[in-house]
Image (cartoon, rainbow, N blue to C red):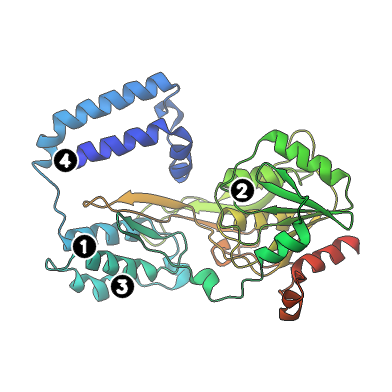
């Protein structure tokens, strides 16, 4: 069995070589410039040094394999969440009481499956879609942020009756002209796009009388992609939210609030009317995009409140190799509303059962009416 240090070094090696993933995962904890590797050669040199140190120091530091008893694993997870989770106060969660309720059940006789279930149940109490525990045999999750609400989206209706056979595929965007208005469906902010895709999409929008951007059932992905898309709709820099990072174990241990801005794109942009369609499965980076659109003077949100997900997740690993993540930042609107709990629409609309039976998307139709009016 490899030592913990060597395992950690190997995992870190792959993360360093995948620089984009590393930047995204460590975004809340930026390193000083002088500590960043400036080239692949420096990254490789750093990796080699790290592996050499791991091999030389593992015996002196660890003196053997790590303790992977259920109690130790429980304590490691509970403590890290205690120190870095960002929404205890806002959700009214007494994490000490959670420990008192779950800790006695972490006993040596339990199986890995039982321990995983115990930890998953504990994390479930955080009521957070950004919280997961991952092992080789499972991944915990809490999807109550959308499962308890109407879907307000029918992909079959959209594909058959609005996009049709002749829609334009522009990178990850599906675009179709509907009554002289450009309808665009974007299913995930994890699907990246090129500047050429944006130029092509904006060229189509310029020929239309308005623009619909549908981000229903968009579970998020890259905040950078959200910013890039919003920048196409902005005429001036606008503060859309403020963010802060959990910095210590105290419930009030946070960094200072920092403004988050939408910055206009250099080059082609769109200044016409924009309707952004949302539902409860609009989450994380899509939730952030909805908030960006909310502050744009030429845009409105139509549909249902988004699912939230206003915290940036951080990652960790337990002594037995299981990994986890949870929210370590907070974000609020300029008015101070926590984006963790979703972004409200400007115009509420729901998918009416009679429309759905007739193959009509009530929310798209309401958006078309708004653009025409």
User: What numbered label is drawn on residue 200?
Assistant: none
CA separation in Å, label 4 and label 3: 32 Å
- Between 203 and 301, the one lying in front of the other is 203
For the residues labelled 4 and 1, the Cα–Cα distance comes to 20 Å
Task: Give the alpha-carbon distance from disc 4 to disc 2, as whole Å.
Answer: 42 Å
Tell me the CA gap for discs 2 and 1.
42 Å
Point out which mark residue 98 bears.
Answer: 3
Q: Residue reaching furthest top?
A: 41
Q: On the rendered image, what quadrant is the N terminus found in?
A: top left
**Residue at (75%, 34%) from the top-left corner?**
266
Residue at the image position 46 percent from the left and 71 percent from the top: 91
Label 4 crowd (10 A; few <14 / some 14-19 / many >=20): some
Marks 3 and 1, how far apart at CA:
21 Å
Q: Which residue is mark 2?
A: 260
Q: Secondary structure at mark 2?
A: strand
Side (left or right) of 16 relative to 350: left
Residue 308, above or below 257? below
| Residue placed under numbered mark 4 in the picture | 3
Q: Residue furthest left?
A: 63
- Foreground disc of the pair 4, 3: 4
Mark carried by residue 112 = 1
Q: Quadrant of the C terminus?
A: bottom right
* Tag 3 secondary structure: helix
């Amino acid at each position: 069995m490899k030592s913990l240090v060597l395992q950690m070094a190997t995992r870190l090696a792959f993360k360093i070589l995948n620089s984009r993933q590393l930047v995204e995962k460590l975004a809340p904890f930026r390193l000083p410039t002088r500590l960043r590797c400036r080239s692949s050669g420096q990254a490789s040199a750093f990796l080699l040094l790290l592996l050499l140190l791991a091999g030389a120091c593992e015996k002196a530091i660890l003196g053997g394999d790590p303790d992977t008893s259920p109690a130790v694993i429980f304590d490691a997870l509970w403590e890290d969440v205690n120190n870095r989770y960002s929404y205890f106060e806002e959700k009214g969660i007494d994490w000490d009481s959670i420990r008192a309720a779950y800790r006695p059940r972490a006993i040596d006789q339990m199986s890995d499956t039982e321990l995983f279930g115990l930890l998953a149940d504990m994390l479930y109490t955080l009521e957070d879609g950004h919280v997961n525990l991952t092992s080789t045999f499972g991944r915990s999750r809490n999807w109550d942020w959308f499962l308890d609400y109407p879907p307000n989206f029918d992909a079959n209706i959209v594909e058959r009756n609005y996009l049709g056979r002749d829609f334009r595929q522009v990178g990850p965007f599906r675009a179709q002209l509907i009554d002289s208005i450009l309808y665009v469906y974007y299913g995930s902010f994890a699907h990246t796009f090129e500047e050429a895709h944006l130029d092509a999409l904006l060229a189509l929008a310029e020929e239309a009388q308005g623009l619909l951007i549908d981000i229903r059932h968009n579970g998020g992905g890259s905040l950078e992609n959200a910013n890039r898309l919003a920048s196409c709709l902005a005429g001036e820099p606008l503060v859309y939210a403020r963010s802060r990072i959990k910095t210590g174990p105290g419930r009030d241990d946070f960094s200072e609030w920092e403004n988050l801005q939408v910055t206009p794109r250099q080059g082609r942009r769109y200044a016409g009317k924009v309707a952004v369609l949302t539902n409860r499965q609009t989450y994380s980076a899509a939730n952030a995009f909805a908030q960006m659109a909310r502050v744009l003077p030429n845009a409105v949100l139509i549909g249902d409140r988004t699912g939230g997900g206003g915290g940036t997740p951080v990652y960790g690993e337990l002594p037995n190799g299981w990994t986890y993540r949870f929210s370590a930042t907070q974000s609020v609107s300029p008015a101070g509303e926590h984006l963790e709990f979703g972004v409200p629409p400007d115009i509420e609309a729901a998918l009416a059962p009679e429309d759905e039976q007739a193959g009509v998307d009530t929310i798209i139709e309401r958006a078309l009416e708004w653009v025409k009016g």
